[in-house]
Image (cartoon, helix red, strand yellow):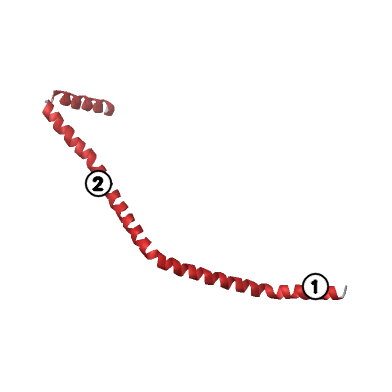
Amino acid sequence: MPILSVIVLILVAGGFVIGAEAGQNKLWADIATIWLIAPLMFSALVCMAVLGGMIYAVARLTQITPRYTLQAQNFALRLTAGVKRGADAAVKPVVWLEQARAALKSLFK
């Protein structure tokens, strides 16, 4: 029964479309086109706003970053030097013992 009622409604709507005069069809076609295009235009406007915001953010970021990237590079260089000093200090006793063992080994051989 539900399928039959939907088929009848579609046929009745088709009959009204066929029986309506041409000017009225054009009016309803224009209204339908507006309702189809309006959400697309709104989503395009939102996308344009997001794109504009991203462009502005990148422009501001390129003005700000040189100062902070220099600070970050200096920090990385200090950190690298500290790590090298720490690694050298950690290995120094082992190297000294190996040198002493090699010296004693060469003396008594």
Residue at image location 30% in from the left, 49% down from the top: 47
Q: Quadrant of the C terminus?
A: bottom right
Residue at image location 31% in from the left, 56% down from the top: 53
Residue at image location 20% in from the left, 35% down from the top: 32
- Which three-letter amino acid code belongs to the residue tagged 1? Ala
Label pair 1/2, CB-CB below 8 angstroms = no
- Residue furthest to the right in view is 109
Residue at image location 21% in from the left, 24% down from the top: 11
Q: Which residue is mark 1?
A: 102
Residue 42 has which mark?
Answer: 2
Q: Nearer the viewer, residue 87 or 70?
A: 70
Which quarter of the figure has residue 34? top left
- Left or right of 21: which side holds 51? right
Q: Nearer the viewer, residue 108 or 44?
A: 108
Q: Earlier in the sequence, mark 1 or mark 2?
A: 2
- Left or right of 59: which side holds 97? right
Q: Nearer the viewer, residue 42 or 8?
A: 42
Mark 2: few, some, or many residues within 10 Å (few <14, many ≥20)? few
For marks 1 and 2, give the CA distance. 80 Å
Q: Position of residue 91 (x, y in %)?
A: 68, 72
Q: Position of residue 1 (x, y in %)?
A: 27, 27
- Which three-letter amino acid code belongs to the residue tagged 2? Phe
Count of marks overlaid on the render: 2
